[in-house]
Amino acid sequence: MTRQVDETILKLTDLRVEAVSGAVLVDNVSLELKRGEVMGLIGESGAGKSTIGLASMVYARAGCRITGGKVEIQGVDVRSLDADGRRARRGQRIAYIAQSAAASFNPAHRLMDQVIEMPVSHGLMTETEAKAWALELFRALDLPNPDTFGDRYPHQVSGGQLQRAMAAMAMSCRPDILVLDEPTTALDVTTQIEVLALLKKLIRDYNMAALYISHDLAVVAQVADRVMVLRHGKMVELGDTEQILLQPHMDYTKALVAERKAADKIAVIATSAQGTAAISADNVTGIYGTFTAVKGVSLSVSRGETVAVVGESGSGKSSLARLIVGLLPTSTGNVKLHGEVLPPALAERNRNTLRKIQLIYQQPDVALNPRQTIGEIIGRPVAFYFNRTPSEVKARVAELLRLVGLPEDYAGRLSTALSGGQKQRICIARALAAEPDVIICDEPTSALDQLVADEILKLLKQLQDDLGVGYLFITHDLGIVRRIAHRTAVMLKGEIVAQGPTAQIFAPPFHPYTEKLLSSVPEMRTDWLDEVLAKRSI
Amino acid sequence: MKIFGYKPTATAWIGLAIITIFILIAIFADAIAPYSESESVGQTWDDPSFANWIGTDNIGRDMLSRLIFGARMTIGVALVTTILSFIIGTTAGFLAAVGGTVIDQILSRIVDVMLSIPLLIFALIILSVFGSSIMTLILTLAILDSTRVFRLARAVATNLVVMEYVEAARLRGEGLWWIMRREILPNALPPMISEFGLRFCFNFLFVASLSFLGLGIQPPYADWGGMVRDNGKAISFGIPAPLWPAMAIAMMTVGVNLVVDWILSINSRPSGASAEM
């Protein structure tokens, strides 16, 4: 079969997706995808990116319906087909790669069985053929020991490997179109680079077309030929990647581009006058069972100062936070508050000690009790630590809400009705209610959209200027570190490999690992990925 | 009309109607019943007549009045038992989930031992030793039943304890009681409420069967299980006397189950219907 080069293989016309409640999730979006082409879909959460991705397979999530428009795959209007016709296309002609590979694999089956399941059940290949093809894919995806890789269970491989295994699963039926839904968002920058490169190679080698969904313009820039910017389910702008990056037409696109570029710059933050350390960790070691998560780390945070801890997942950043707050008792070393050694276990620390160290979590959704009103959530620490009367608590809650930029009447609402950014503001207000010396921020912006995350960072900075609170800021995002941290500590495998003023950490001479981290952060150039890969392979 | 913000299904309405009627009957038994609970008004197993609408029982008491007072006893005992068993079981279950490994091990092993003894046998032994007053009956059943509640409460709470809002409360220095009552309980309510319905049904049947065996509610109090036993022989004479209380038991059980099914379907339902599949 000869394949036409510029054959249009996916065409969406005036696509419209509505929720059962009547809200319009995707509003008259049209796009065309040719063989060999990659289109990036960019936008914040709620922009309808994933909904479009799924709708191109004529699938709508529970509670949603495709109410209008056409979905044509290789010229066939799939919406007009019956269930069998649709099933024949899903997986075979068009395949989907989801953000969380871990959630997409059945933990009880071996990887090989899951990868070959689709072609075998569709009757496209015999089991032997499917296995041979899977092995070829494992090899193409650069997986370790490809011959035996399939014998493992999902929990036995790393996140990056699992994401690649998922790419293999999507490729198992040799589809023409791949829908990639934030495939690298859950990965560390160093892993992201590998997965990106392999996905790009895969699409090129097998001459497929792809929809690449992401919130990160710099990532999309590496793989996409064209980019569609979406907002509130509507198309804002569609253009070649270069044009979107360099000459965006619409204001919203300009804001997105400017926002992403700001993250690339090193804002020089002068090291604040080093006061006495509010909290300090002195050669602390933390052990889970037989695994040493933190090895002999020393670190201190003063009031009014932001100290960033960066590293990949599994580097021990969060464990360090747990050591400091007492959730994970220290095995050796001390945690000190204003020079005074704290008991290692949480239960032995007194109320006033607990008050002075507060924690903000990565997932505001699970950090707020869904059955308590915001007034109860913020008011509790006020009443608990300061023994205020109900009317005083109420006034303080209103004040705190104002401080984090939310209307006072939110006090009566449940947190479930709020957006991610608003929830994170509530978490910040709850931490501030205790009037702490230091707030430990554990990836507080990772679960948020870029523009929202930026607002949260500004708020944190503002609060630091006004109240003089110190932050221990745990993150994997180097862009954030550059913008807000006075001092930075780089963690690798439970140890701090470099520590010092941020400007110094991010200036040569680098520690080799810092350099690797830095060079792995996608830049807003279309040729960045190829350059980095070329450099590394030398 | 909506209940707890959800629209009941048709079957749920039937269930709600049955329960409401029975509960109203139980509350206003004195006003509704044509005769008193224990007065003899006719011969043994009289046919239905204008004076005794569904006839009389084995010693000539009005069947309808006995049924009405029986509702009060049977439903009342089952309800109090279930409430008590939930208070014990939920508290212990939450404590096991929140209080750490040692407390969890102690409570769980005690419950394992209790669960290993068949419920009916256990109840029969205790009731024969201590005698069957209503108080002993309720306490025995509540404690035995609370082991089942403990299992669910512990499982639900174990999933909630790992939530970061619970961790945040711990970090704040909150005590166990606050964490159980304010952080866990409100989030554990939906599955616990449907379990309450199921446990109520079970206790209701259990009280009825104990009475049927003669160890439950004692005469002269009327109760449905006991009425089935007292009038059991009538069936061999072709007289439907034992069928009336049996039917009441069945109706109440079915009614509660219909409502529980609906509550369970709310809990497990995805946020909306899926279409275009």
Image (cartoon, coloured by chain):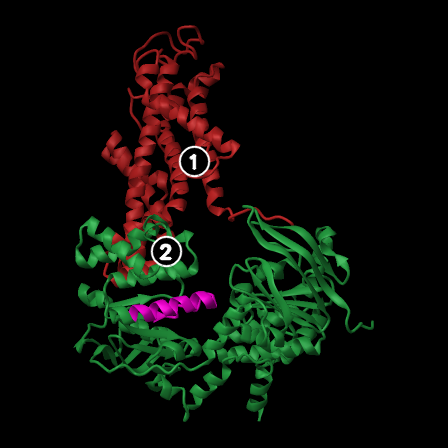
Chain colours: A green, B red
Q: Position of residue A507 (x, y in %)?
A: 41, 89
Secondary structure predominantly adopted by residues drawn in magenta: helix
Query: Quick check: is A319 in the magenta stretch?
Result: no
Q: Chain of mark 1?
A: B
Query: Quick check: is A463 in the magenta stretch?
Result: yes
The answer, for residue B111, to whether it is visible in the render is no
Kind of residue indicated by mark 1 = Ile
Kind of residue indicated by mark 2 = Leu
Disc 1 and disc 2 on one polypeptide chain: yes
Who's the residue at 35% across and 45% down the image? B149
Q: Dot 1 corresponds to which residue?
A: B3
Q: Quadrant of residue A462?
A: bottom left
Residue B162 against residue A281 in the figure, above or below: above
Q: Quadrant of residue A7?
A: bottom right
Look at the numbered discs 1 and 2 and tell me whether their residues touch, using CB distance below 8 Å.
no
Who's the residue at 58% across and 81% down the image? A145
Who's the residue at 35% across and 57% down the image? A406
Q: CA distance from mark 1 to mark 2?
A: 26 Å
Residue A476 against residue A23 in the figure, above or below: below
> Element at badge 1?
loop
Label 2 CA crowd tier, 10 Å (few <14, some 14–19, many 20+): many
Residue A174 against residue A63 in the figure, above or below: below
Q: Position of residue A8 (x, y in %)?
A: 75, 67
Who's the residue at 32% across and 56% down the image? B97
Stretch in magenta: A441-464
